[in-house]
Amino acid sequence: MTTRAEWVAVDWGTSNLRAWGIDASGNTVFTRSSPKGMGKLTREEFPGALTELLEGAETGSGAVDVLICGMAGARQGWLEAPYLDTPADLRGLFAGAVRPEMPGSRYLPAILPGVCQKTIGAENVMRGEETQLLGLHVLMPEFSGVVCMPGTHSKWAALEAARITRFATAMTGEMYEVLRTHSVLRHSLAGDLDGPGRAEGFDAGVDAGLARPDNLLGLLFSVRAGSLLSNRQPDWCAGYLSGLLIGCEIGAHRDWIGDAEVPLIGASALCALYVKALAKVGAKARLIDATEAVLAGLKAARQFAV
Amino acid sequence: MTTRAEWVAVDWGTSNLRAWGIDASGNTVFTRSSPKGMGKLTREEFPGALTELLEGAETGSGAVDVLICGMAGARQGWLEAPYLDTPADLRGLFAGAVRPEMPGSRYLPAILPGVCQKTIGAENVMRGEETQLLGLHVLMPEFSGVVCMPGTHSKWAALEAARITRFATAMTGEMYEVLRTHSVLRHSLAGDLDGPGRAEGFDAGVDAGLARPDNLLGLLFSVRAGSLLSNRQPDWCAGYLSGLLIGCEIGAHRDWIGDAEVPLIGASALCALYVKALAKVGAKARLIDATEAVLAGLKAARQFAV
């Protein structure tokens, strides 16, 4: 007997779209993904992208709830879902959802809100990470403390059980990409970036970033100077650049880190770099699978709604 | 009676090429410029670009010395001029010049070296600024102290009369351009960037950067969050971004700044921003015209050679 999905959980980010069909027992009965992220779609294209993604999926024949988190709820997305303000109780995510229309479709989409912080001078926004944080709360109900979410825009969030009390964003991943591609540093990073020098460069970069996080603009130029004067190769330079940025990010958040383990939610290869860098400031980290977290969060959002 | 140039002074940067014909009394008898900067030329195109620039110029009919500073001496330039290492006596620049060949031409080009700093972990390079610094020494012979040279890659140099003892580079100007053009911040900077909010944004940005230079990666994202949450307009965001970067740069160099006036060499509009930002840390600045400095430096390099 084939189990059918009772509802569909969706993570609709800037770059990708992923869906999981969930049955009445909470099991995943299908997984779908597509590169049709929010960044590639006009507002009118969202219903079609969702329909296409779910075509032929094993769902019931009637109306099907589709619960979405992420950038689909941004101003440039499908339908803007207003932010919850910090301190934000993540159990209230579903209550803040918006419902875009899909006339003639049996899908009933709802988009979860993001979370914002309106404090002047510490303004901040997240979309998608709040759902992962709700998932973390369900996976580790006893946890309160700081969570680090490495990525294009890394998030640091202070969690008190199901509440986000404050959070910060560091443009670490985007900075790496932008500098690698568009700055003078590209000359030093032209070649094989995954050679054996990468780990050594990363190590040196983290040390330099942690020692002088206030001097990032200066340290960055040392990537270029190091390749010109000390014959640093592209793999070393790539590791060094990555290490500088992560070292500066962690250096700026030292006062967030206490004695407790820091949960890391993100891509596993990237999180492994943060584990190494956090160890240098005496912090232990615990890896949380990002997909597991977002799926747990989408399920929890729905559960807390009833 | 028309005065003829005895020799030609050339500043050959990444983006532009400028030349001044200098007569026997040290007066400028012609000025030429072209967009044929080093970044746009292959090695083979340098002689032609120089000949084209000087076509019909009032020089003597015999051989003409052409003294060049800047990126023409880089590895990707016309002919690599090895760096002088710090501490570097700038009166020795001419002795380190290289002489590219121009067979059949009456021009005798010589390219001045740049200056490097080989200290591991503080590796650094400059090309062009060393000539401006020699010019500063000639213009202000009594001066010893810190000089700030705002630009794409801002330089901070400790000068003891004609000697550079150490220097640093901050990628401030390039970072502004790269973030404005290629990062998520471009959404917040799309529009009129020179509106009345720019000065206010700059002021707020400098304050934020000076307060937390270690948190640049976080502050940068606040440009985006500010436009989403607090309806900051593109002009304000542009000023804020510029202020953040300059504030972080100055914040990282606070221990370089003493009680003395800081000479600022660079584009006048940019230097005016640094004057404002430096005032916030109690530092006085003195504007030095960059063209005047480079020309004085090229003349001095030639004088110290004889």
Image (cartoon, coloured by chain):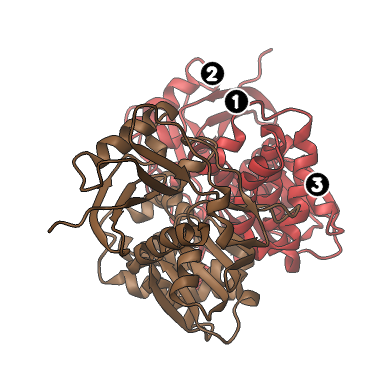
Chain colours: A brown, B red
Instruction: Tell whether label 2 touches label 1 (CB within 8 Å).
Output: yes
Asked if residue B167 shows in the view, the reply is: no
Q: Secondary structure at mark 2?
A: loop
Q: Residue B282 occupies which quadrant of the picture?
A: bottom right
Output the chain of dot 3.
B
Q: Position of residue A32 (x, y in %)?
A: 25, 49
- Pair 3/1: label in front: 3
Quadrant, the N terminus of chain B? top right
Task: Please name the residue that numbered disc 1 is placed on.
Answer: B5
Q: Residue A63 occupies which quadrant of the picture?
A: top left
Name which of mark 1 and mark 2 comes first in the sequence: 1
Task: Please name the residue that numbered disc 3 is placed on.
Answer: B275
Above or below for A39 versus A266: above
Task: Please name the residue that numbered disc 2 is placed on.
Answer: B57
A244 vs A40, left or right, is: right
Query: In the rendered picture of this protein, how many numbered marks are placed on residues?
Result: 3
Give the residue furthest to the top: B1
Output the chain of dot 2.
B
